[in-house]
Image (cartoon, rainbow, N blue to C red):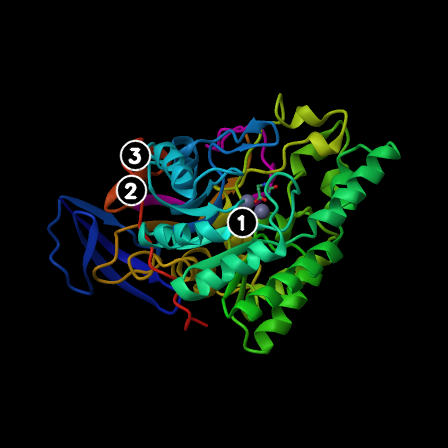
Amino acid sequence: MSTLIKNGRIVTADQDYTADIYIERDTITNIGGALPQVADTVIDAKGKYVIPGGIDVHTHMDMPFGGTTSSDDFETGTRAAAFGGTTCLIDFAIQTKGQKIREALDVWWKKGEKATVDYSLHMIVTDLPEAHLEDLNEMVREGLTSFKLFMAYPGVLMVDDATIFRAMKQTAANGALVCMHAENGGVIDLLIQKAIAEGKKAPIYHALTRPTTAEGEAVNRAIALAEMAGAPVYIVHLSSADALEKVSEARDRGIPAFAETCPQYLLLSIEDLDRPNFEGAKYVFTPPLREKWHQDKLWAGLKKNTLQVVSTDHCPFCFKEQKELGRDSFAKIPNGGPGVENRLQLLFHHGVNMKRISLNRWVEIVSTAPAKMFGLYPRKGTISIGSDADLVIWDPNAELTISAHTHHMRVDYSMFEGFKVKGNAEIVLSRGDIVVNKGVWNGKAGRGHFIKRDTFAGAWR
Ligand code: URP
Ligand code: ZN
Ligand code: ZN
């Protein structure tokens, strides 16, 4: 099976030129000005950009959390991702306390069998006695080269500093990367208890009990632990200027500290949590939304490469029956929000169109940097001979109003309802297969592969 993409403007993290792309089966085999014009499928991409498929390194499909389960599974979630131009995601397998890490991996491999595009997994480690450190090396051999640890959610996911340090020592030796949920969980728990005792139970108190200082403190501590362990660290879903400053200071000292943010922190604010009729619950996720002024700092961080990646932290819960579990108290609202479909659209419109970032930088933060950070590059994250044909024909002029009525995520609301964006995925190829063709779904459950990843390339900036 061969595919020719003609006349497209190829945009990668560092190039921008017009050429044809030739694909045989699942791989790019030629790029140039005068390729053979015969192929089983020919796509004319004149007037469009051709970019490497988006890579979302932070999603939670089919995840039991907060007394319920996230509403997208690997089939519906990867399908929605593809509609928005994301052709690979890295989800989180979870080791429950006392469970063998190997058993946790088997559970998530089973869930992943339904994926419609390629995916990989990080492992959330909640229990790591000294005797089980070798399990981390086993995961790395299986191609799982990153681990998420939580400094928040005491009694559920949180681990202590000794566990973090132990895990980081191990990753310093085996080349994996620790991803850190950095919020001071102990202090936040006390603030939550106090708010509830005072009858402050509306969704806004989710944000008011998780101050930016609790994030800044934890980011600082995570980086200090990594420095002592001689390991790199990647801060997930960074939301505030306080946290950004800590990453910036560390990077200025040459410490391998990295971080991602998410569209919700760039475009939404604490005011959304104060929406009437319990609508604020739609915006309950952690870390919480911040005051609006933090947004400019995060955009600046993206521009300066203090932040390297934008992921979504896609963790959807329906408003009806799921978010409503917390009607009588914000502490019972399942934490998480949907977004896997809209990342490229929002970043293109609010980043490139609004001149906050360049076109190349857009490709870098949504595809290339995630691939490099998590051991997928150059198989994914770029357009080069030998790379997987995960490609997006992007129409920079397509206009879209984001809405739950038209999105493909299995959730009954959109955090970005009514947002008008210009720029959208028109045709999406996953390993050479056209999975989305002008709004029509051609993919199928189970065609996505689990991708084994390389270890963290420590020399990468
Ligand atoms: O609220 C969130 N972010 N839910 C997903 C779990 C996490 O902490 O990433
Ligand atoms: Zn988290
Ligand atoms: Zn998350």
Residue 443 - label: 3
Q: Is residue 164 left or right of residue 198?
A: left
Q: Can residue 309 be seen in this snapshot? A: no
Residue, x 62% and y 70% (percent of image)? 248
Crowding at dot 1, Cα within 10 Å, few <14 / some 14-19 / many 20+, comes out as many
Q: Is 111 in the magenta? A: no
As rendered, which of 161 and 55 lies closer to the eye?
A: 161
- Residue under pointer 1: 346
Secondary structure type for disc 2: loop
Please, is residue 397 above or below residue 177 in the view?
above
Q: Magenta residues? A: 405-429
Q: Which residue is mark 2?
A: 449
Is residue 238 something that shows in the picture? yes
Do the residues bearing badges 1 and 3 touch, measured as CB atoms within 8 Å? no
Percent x, y of residue 315:
54, 38
Foreground mark, 1 or 3?
3
Label 3: which secondary element: loop
Three-letter amino acid code of the residue under disc 3: Gly
* Mark 2 and mark 3: Cα distance apart in space: 13 Å
Looking at the image, residue 212 sits to the left or right of residue 72; the answer is: right
Percent from the top left, x then y, of residue 265?
63, 51
- Residue lying furthest bottom: 253
